[in-house]
Amino acid sequence: MCIFCKIVNKEIPNYTIYEDDQVLAFLDVNPTAYGHTLVIPKKHYESFVECSSDDLNHVMEVAQKIAKKMQENLHCDGINILSNVGEQAGQSVHHFHVHLIPRYKDSDVIQ
Ligand code: 5GP
Ligand code: ZN
């Protein structure tokens, strides 16, 4: 079973940001910036390309809500929203996920 399926099944602990029956959002274990969050469908899809339109829509709706919360609560100055498809593009976990990376004017780097 893939590592994100194990997170969905609660076999691996995570810091959950949002959860419903279809989608899970949790903090990235190796954050690029403070608040770096991953949004995933609970169902396993290899990547963005294979994801069903229903799961894709819901993942993106949740991602948008979290992005708004990042602006309100983290007061970030920008947000990267991205998904890597394939190892050549940097995908290391082969369960579709969207990265939400808040960006800060003064302190973008985690020490
Ligand atoms: P990718 O490189 O596939 O686009 O992104 C995978 C992301 O998953 C990486 O940013 C990595 O830090 C994160 N990651 C890998 N394993 C775990 C884990 O067990 N828990 C959490 N929270 N994040 C993970
Ligand atoms: Zn999986």
Image (spheres, rainbow, N blue to C red):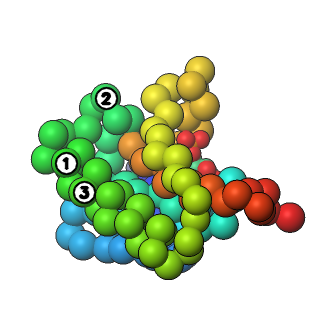
Q: Does dot 3 land on a helix, a strand or a loop?
A: helix
* Image point (38%, 66%), residue name: 68
Name the image quarter holding residue 27: bottom right
- CB-based contact (under 8 Å), mark 1 and mark 3: yes
Q: Which mark is residue 57?
A: 1
- The image shows residue 20 at horizontal and vertical percentages of 24, 72
Q: Is residue 100 left or right of residue 52?
A: right
Q: CA distance from mark 1 to mark 3?
A: 6 Å
Along the viewing direction, whichever of 71 and 16 lies nearer the viewer: 71
| Neighbours of disc 2 within 10 Å: few (<14), some (14-19), many (20+) | few
Residue 26 percent location from the top left of the image: 48, 68
- 100 horizontally vs 8: left or right: right
One can see residue 31 in this view: no
Q: Which residue is mark 2?
A: 49
Image quarter of the C terminus: bottom right
Residue at the spot 47% in from the left edge and 41% down from the top edge:
82
Viewer-nearest residue: 111 or 14: 111
Q: Is mark 1 within 8 Å of ligand 2?
A: no
Q: Secondary structure at mark 2?
A: loop
| Furthest residue toward right | 111
Q: Name the residue tied to disc 3.
A: 61
